[in-house]
Image (cartoon, rainbow, N blue to C red):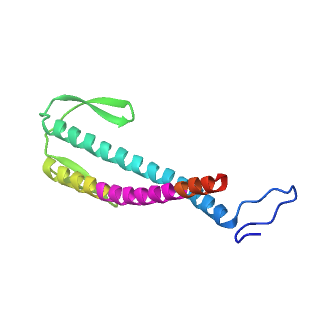
């Protein structure tokens, strides 16, 4: 019996060596983690797109004049018709139920900071993804070379 090789099983077939089982488990875990990281990246991209759309809406609303008719969203796909009152800027929830007035430039700056934070987080997740993908490719190369060595 060679090192790291299990004895024949009850049918006389060789079982998978311990080191190969460990590598197979590592590859399986890497695949699962890659899937999770892809989901995180998709979520970050979705949030970024929503913020960019919000910035466009803010620009559009900043051009509204007093008395202009507009559709105000209540929920996804549900709107009410309303007329704009005096436009003094935007009211922004800053947490704990506190709302503060901000002008379009201030809201844009706040949203730009959120996008920067998302992109920073995206970079870190992408780095983890790339590292994990590289390790998975190394494992796959090891599996391929072990398969070639057995046939050779």
- In percent of the image, x 37 and y 59: which residue is there? 127
Is 40 included in the stretch rendered in magenta?
Answer: no
64 in relation to 46, above or below: above
Residue 147 relative to residue 109: left or right? right
- Outermost residue on the right side: it is 10
Residues 30 and 41: in front is 30
Residues 143 and 24: in front is 143
- In percent of the image, x 25 and y 56: which residue is there? 116
Return the x and y of residue 5 as percentages of the image width and height: 73, 66
Res. 109 image quadrant: bottom left
144 in relation to 1, above or below: above
Residue 39 relative to residue 74: left or right? right
Is 132 included in the stretch rendered in magenta?
Answer: yes
Res. 130 image quadrant: bottom left
150 in relation to 22, above or below: above
- In percent of the image, x 87 and y 59: which residue is there? 10
- In percent of the image, x 36 and y 36: which residue is there? 74
Return the x and y of residue 114 as percentages of the image width and height: 27, 55
Predominant SS along the magenta part: helix
Residues 42 and 75: in front is 42
Return the x and y of residue 93 as percentages of the image width and height: 29, 54
Residue 29 relative to residue 98: left or right? right
Return the x and y of residue 120 as percentages of the image width and height: 30, 59
**In the rendered image, which quarter contains the N terminus?**
bottom right
Residues 35 and 88: in front is 35
* Magenta region, residue range: 119-139
User: What count of labels does the image hold?
Assistant: 0
Residue 82 relative to residue 38: left or right? left
- Outermost residue on the bottom side: it is 3
């Amino acid at each position: 019996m060679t090192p790291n090789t299990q004895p024949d099983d009850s049918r006389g077939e060789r079982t998978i060596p311990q080191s190969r089982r460990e590598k197979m488990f590592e590859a399986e875990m890497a695949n699962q983690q890659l899937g999770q990281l892809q989901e995180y990246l998709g979520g970050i991209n979705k949030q970024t797109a929503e913020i960019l759309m919000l910035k466009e809406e803010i620009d559009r609303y900043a051009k509204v004049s007093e008395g202009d008719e507009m559709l105000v969203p209540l929920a996804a796909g549900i709107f009410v018709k309303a007329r704009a009152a005096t436009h003094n800027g935007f009211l922004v929830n800053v947490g704990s139920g506190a709302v503060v007035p901000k002008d379009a430039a201030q809201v844009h700056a706040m949203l730009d900071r959120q996008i920067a934070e998302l992109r920073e987080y995206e970079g870190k997740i992408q780095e983890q993804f790339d590292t994990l993908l590289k390790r998975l490719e190394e494992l796959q190369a090891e599996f391929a070379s072990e398969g070639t060595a057995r046939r050779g």
